[in-house]
Image (cartoon, coloured by chain):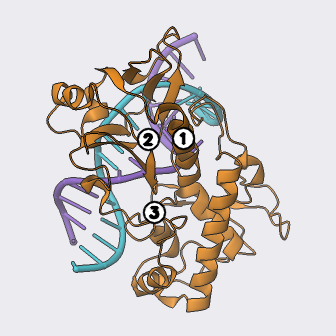
Chain colours: A orange, B cyan, C purple
Amino acid sequence: MPELPEVETVRQGLAKWVAGRTIATVEVHHPRSIRRHLPGDAHFIAMLTGRTVLDVSRRGKYLWLPLDSGDAIVGHLGMSGQLLMQPADAEDEKHLRIRFTFTDGGPQLRFVDQRTFGGLAVSEGGAELPDEIAHIARDPMDTLFDDEAFVARLRGKHTEVKRALLDQTLISGVGNIYADEALWRARLHGARPTDALTRPVARRLLAHVRDVLGEAIVAGGTSFDELYVNVNGESGYFDRSLNAYGREGEPCHRCGTPIRREQFMNRSSFSCPRCQPRPRTR
DNA sequence: AGTCTACCCTGCCTGC
DNA sequence: TGCAGGCAGGGTAGAC
């Protein structure tokens, strides 16, 4: 469940359901789901068994669960990962990869991931901020995000603006959907060169990024299908508020021009040909 | 150093 | 009906 609003929705659900609970057992059903945990599954299990989860934190699209040991479980959902709370007697999901049970015998935490791009790992001493995600920039919902530093770094780059929005070391949490939505709101084509953006335009773009992420969090995220759900298996409803993403051929909500679809970085980009004209060739 | 392409996976949809 | 190809919201290693 990819972008920041979906991950934040999961974080809130997890915090409510697992904070304060003690892990009884850990099962790893697929090695690829802990491939970032280099010491392997036996070590993964030993580090977690008997530990108490203190909280659930997030930076960008990454989650981590600080433990009473000072370590943390670091998680990324990749393209298709889910963290679900399930009663013990619920049938195993087809793509169940990792299961946690708790000493209170209550609902289990299950990591389910069809494509296995996501995964979990134990970060030693990572309760505050795991080393594994130290390279990830703060996200724009973080109170310590530095707007002017972002604007300066963005304008200092020699790349296209959509590419920059997707660069998690510059600004984290933005993925393909919310990048397209923010660019639509800012009336910028994703291929606009970052070094040609004025400061006011860059600031406005950041404000739109923050707005669209905030609105999507309130809506519980964006779901097109059952692959993207909260910890209770429920879908968010921000898809009803999308202006660009997935709307090829449908009228722009601002000017009525049919939304266009273009290939970019091996994925689709949606924009309004009139509101977001392509820049002249660089 | 900074930027960008190729690749990692499974499942579903489309067109032949 | 079967099959090939394209597509999907992610990150990263390594090539330039």
Q: Which residue is mark 3?
A: A172
Identify residue type, mark 2. Leu
Q: Position of residue A75 (x, y in %)?
A: 37, 42
Q: CA distance from mark 3 to mark 1?
A: 17 Å
Side of A278 relative to A161 (left or right): right
Picture quadrant of residue A177: bottom right
Q: Which residue is mark 2?
A: A77
Element on which disc 2 rests: loop
Q: Residue at x 48, y 64 (%)?
A: A139
**Do labels 3 and 2 touch, CB within 8 Å?**
no
Q: CA distance from mark 2 to mark 1?
A: 10 Å
Chain letter of disc 2 in the image = A
Q: Are marks 3 and 1 on the same chain?
A: yes
Up the image or down, A145 lies above or below A12; here it is below
Element on which disc 3 rests: loop
Say whether disc 2 or disc 1 marks the residue closer to the N-terminus: 1
**Do labels 2 and 1 touch, CB within 8 Å?**
yes
Query: Which of the labelled discs sits on residue A10, or is there none?
Result: 1
Identify residue type, mark 1. Val
Side of A226 relative to A147 (left or right): right
Q: CA distance from mark 3 to mark 2?
A: 14 Å
Q: Position of residue A202 (x, y in %)?
A: 57, 83
Identify residue type, mark 3. Ser
Say whether disc 3 or disc 2 marks the residue closer to the N-terminus: 2
Q: Position of residue A274 (x, y in %)?
A: 75, 75
Q: Are marks 3 and 2 on the same chain?
A: yes
Up the image or down, A221 lies above or below A148; here it is above
Nearer to us in this view, A214 or C13: A214
Nearer to us in this view, A266 or A243: A243
Side of C7 relative to B7 (left or right): right
